[in-house]
Amino acid sequence: MSRSRCGQSLPRCPLKLTSDCSGTIRARKVRCQPRHVILQPVLNTTAKAINTAAIDLFFKHGYEAATLRDVADKVGLKVASLYNYIASKQELLFAIMYDVMEDLRRDVEAAVAGQTDPVERLSAAVRTHVRFHASRTKEVFVGNSELRSLTPKNRVKVIRQRDEYEALFRDLIQAGSAAGAFHVDDVKVATFAILAMCTGPSTWFSPRGRLSVADLGDLYTDLALRLLEAPSARASTNGRAPAALPSHAS
């Protein structure tokens, strides 16, 4: 048996016996799949488990208090084995924070891409932002609370991501203001206010409460548009009346 770089045993390529016209038996190797094809599902599954465990531990205990031994124990690995998947605890934190911002940006850009009206574009962005933060609360919490724990180099990268994301919302509000759809005295302050408000659900929302993630997104969209003195999101969405909120909400 041969071994991969992560210490897993891999079978050697099997031999196939053949005979020629004289009856002589010859052995030849059968071509094996490349090692990365064999290992990739295993690596992906374990890497995801490590990432999930780290998010949970950083969320519950904070980056400084959580250790790689805690992560290893949670996924059933030895500490030394973690280094087959990550370089350090710092790299793990950076990956979590970077990836959640990338996912958020992609989701919002995709939601906005299909809209042309300024009010609908901002509505789609706000609704997506709120639903994302209500659905991925642990990752968002880690991203918002552990910026101080990043190395200066990694912190610069994440701050750049945030600046670009903020600019996306600022451009949407500016475009709506220029079109006369919004009434805003200070676009930059309005952007900060809306992002701060719409990020809030990540600290308190529970799927066991009276509101669904979709309900929450609609409510916050309406609040954001009221702040900008724009038509109500729910009243202006393709002319459809808003769905009634569930009576069991708490």
Image (spheres, grey):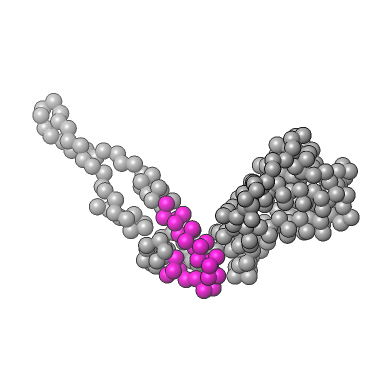
Question: Which residue appears at 47% of the width and 61% of the height?
Answer: 53
Give the left or right position of residue 38, taking residue 53 as reference.
Answer: left
Q: Nearer the viewer, residue 184 or 77?
A: 184
Question: Which residue appears at 61% of the width and 67% of the height?
Answer: 146
Among the 4 quarters of the image, the one containing residue 204: bottom right
Quarter containing the C terminus? bottom right
Question: Which residue appears at 52% of the width and 74% of the height?
Answer: 65
| Residue 69 within the magenta-colored segment of the rendering | yes
Among the 4 quarters of the image, the one containing residue 47: bottom left
Q: Majority secondary structure of the magenta segment?
A: helix
Residue furthest to the top in view is 21
Q: Nearer the viewer, residue 166 or 198?
A: 198
Q: Which of 206 and 165 is in front in this view?
A: 206
Q: x, y percentage for residue 5? A: 36, 57
Q: x, y percentage for residue 164? A: 71, 54
Residue furthest to the front in view is 247
Give the left or right position of residue 39, taking residue 164 as reference.
Answer: left
Q: In this view, does 101 lie above or below 114?
A: below
Residue 178 visible in the displayed image: yes
Instruction: Give, as a single range, the part of the protein colored magenta.
Output: 45-71
| Residue 97 within the magenta-colored segment of the rendering | no
Residue 112 visible in the displayed image: no
Give the left or right position of residue 94, taking residue 32 as reference.
Answer: right
Question: Which residue appears at 24% of the width and 52% of the height?
Answer: 1
Q: x, y percentage for residue 217? A: 68, 48
Residue furthest to the left in view is 23
Q: Which of 12 and 133 is in front in this view?
A: 133
